[in-house]
Image (tube, coloured by chain):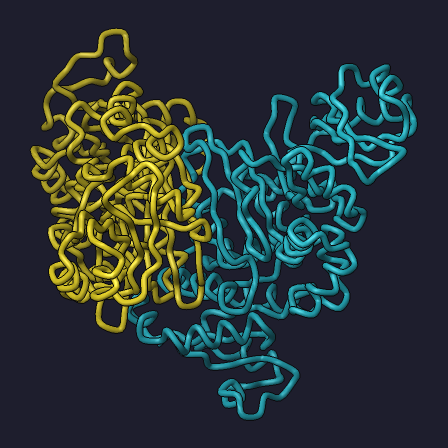
Chain colours: A cyan, B yellow
Amino acid sequence: MINVAIMGYGTVGAGVFKVLTMNHDLIAKRVGEELNVKYVLDLREFPGDPAQEVLTHDFNDILNDPDVKIVVETMGGLRPSYTFTKTLLLAGKSVCTSNKELVAEHGVELREIAKENNINYLFEASCGGGIPIIHALDSSLTADEIDAVTGIVNGTTNYILTQMTVHDESFDVALKAAQAKGFAELHPEADIEGHDARRKIAILSTMAYGKHVSYQNVVTEGITDIDTTDIEYAKAQGLKIKLLASSRKTEHGIWAMVAPMLVSAENMLYNVEGVLNAIYVHGNALGDAIFYGSGAGSLPTASAVAGDIITIARSLDRTLPSDWTGEELELMPTDDIEHAFFVRFAGSEEEAKAVFGDIAPVRLDNVDGEFGFMTAVMTEKAFRECSEKAGKVIKSIRRA
Amino acid sequence: MINVAIMGYGTVGAGVFKVLTMNHDLIAKRVGEELNVKYVLDLREFPGDPAQEVLTHDFNDILNDPDVKIVVETMGGLRPSYTFTKTLLLAGKSVCTSNKELVAEHGVELREIAKENNINYLFEASCGGGIPIIHALDSSLTADEIDAVTGIVNGTTNYILTQMTVHDESFDVALKAAQAKGFAELHPEADIEGHDARRKIAILSTMAYGKHVSYQNVVTEGITDIDTTDIEYAKAQGLKIKLLASSRKTEHGIWAMVAPMLVSAENMLYNVEGVLNAIYVHGNALGDAIFYGSGAGSLPTASAVAGDIITIARSLDRTLPSDWTGEELELMPTDDIEHAFFVRFAGSEEEAKAVFGDIAPVRLDNVDGEFGFMTAVMTEKAFRECSEKAGKVIKSIRRA
């Protein structure tokens, strides 16, 4: 029997407890041994819940129990999860987590400690919920030079944008609907301002390119400025606006960005709607591949955590191979990143053409005093300079 | 340095050689050691090709070289690949393959031999080309009870059906186009009669349910009977016809089937067009997940094979955990499998209703003397009995 502890009995932690109970026999068969949840750590009480029987309020119960080989960290945030995780790894206990914040901030150090102690620190659930992308990047896709990763990795913003597109709702109405359905938090900033997606693309890019991408260096824009007129312009061109978390290996270096982007129907992410997530990967041998599934939710995320538990249980006292290194990946200057830009412009066509060259204006029936156009592909710097020169640019949205 | 041999220098074998060369440094970094192709086994000569330098015509060169730890089998077919693979595994060399025929026929035995010898027999490339589904079923998705697998796993037939749907081509014209483009073989029976998909769903189902599914037991229908009228009826209902390789865990048991089926736009496989492949998996915790990518082609398939090589190279002298067992999975009787059936009927609406109950007729402008309708969900047996009773059933296609 292998003993497991779960730290944090919230949505994901409770999901892990449920999956380990519900699929107990099947998991025992796959591991070759029974998995037993010996402790659930939480400050709260859960009367009537089966977890109450194994509940502890004291982290030391887990730390000091030599029977516990695997600990699940589903507390979220950095404190106290960072200290707890580090202490456990140093004590020779493997840890798996859904905590993208902690992985993005301290993943390199924690993975290094796990390696030194011949154990594992796994985080499949940190990106894309149940979608098994992290392990794939660490195993099946290792023969490829990955040169592109693009994900719809935040269900909240994808739900909001889908509502705005399909039901012509305003951002505020769509956000309230998302909150009412439990798809958005009361304080939704981390989602709608792109910080959640930023951490995820930093983790995915680190796995894809084999050097550490600091999330702080990822260019990040949220969707709070997207209005119904932007959506109408997108529709008029057969496009959709999606919050994309992307990174690309180019001849000038690697860039990473979270931003609302215009996506065409040919793009395989065009049809990813609502709270679903999808992650696109391109490899120099593989070509295009997409992983699609539930990016959040108690059970899908728990499925990924529990998959990590099983992986660890099958490899106790052996660090799984990986080429994640602590070396920092220096991203190329933001100024050099290239996209086409859709511009909403308050000037005349002549004024736009004088600076941006040949453009095809897009006009909306119900919108006066402006029109839109798509620029050629240009760098961020060139676009900024052109915008300043032309003036009268109301706003711009990159094209994926 | 780890030495590798490639047996069979055809499309996939040459792709593996190319990937190992092209991504040599990157792979060395990921493995922690250089990978060197010491032998390529083929009866032919390849003057001018870099493989010529390491070419051998003698299997014993590989078998008797103690330096060779990993052998790639990309010969295809059962003979001599079965004997070669078995001999190599018994000699303590790990093998990885793209050979679905061999895996479907002898995979259980070969995996067993690998386990006894503490080495590996891997076959990621046998289903869905570059799509990393096999390893996912063996690792990330192990916490789930998988209850559904459905794949578009044959690019040839999907290309033909796409041409018939999008360009209104007849089956024969579409097949010739596929042959001209190299998407179909001169003798395309294995693809168009469903035998290729049958082997793949047998392998996928074995991985998903943990017991051996014999491909011979998979109910199999190809697409050779699909005509332009069927496609028109599908379109009239907003549906598409796809060759689906499916298996389901139901309360009555597990079934597996390859057949052309009617797919609605809500189905995530609806938009999988041309030679692309996609595999849908449902788990009791995971929910829905889809893996999407290039199902064939030299480099995508080679990417999967090379991924297996790396996995083996990182775990030499250690069998990777798996719960694939030799135990045979007894599929439920075909008679008990349930679907709705779309029926083309040469009788009157009254005759159809008398047997099938309330139906909504679908009529095509240019087709006289028949109409179509969708039945309720019923068993194969009930449908067969109803069809016999009603008579005048021209043909039927299941609804996914």
With respect to residue A158, does A219 lie above or below? above
Q: Position of residue A297 (x, y in %)?
A: 56, 66
Counting every numbered tag in the picture gives 0
Taking depth in this image into account, of B302 and A55 the one nearest to the observer is B302
Q: Is B244 drawn above or below residue A248 in the view shown?
A: below
Quadrant of the image for the N terminus of chain A?
bottom left
- Is residue B100 visible in this depiction of the protein? no
Residue B357 quadrant: bottom left
Residue drawn at 45 percent across, 63 percent down: B286
Compared across the picture, whether A12 is left or right of B156 comes to right
Q: Quadrant of residue B287?
A: bottom left
Residue B15 visible, this orientation: yes
Which sits in the foreground, B60 or B378?
A: B378
Residue B95 x/y as whole percent: 22, 40
Q: Quadrant of the C terminus of chain A?
A: top right
Q: Residue at x 23, y 7 (%)?
A: B47
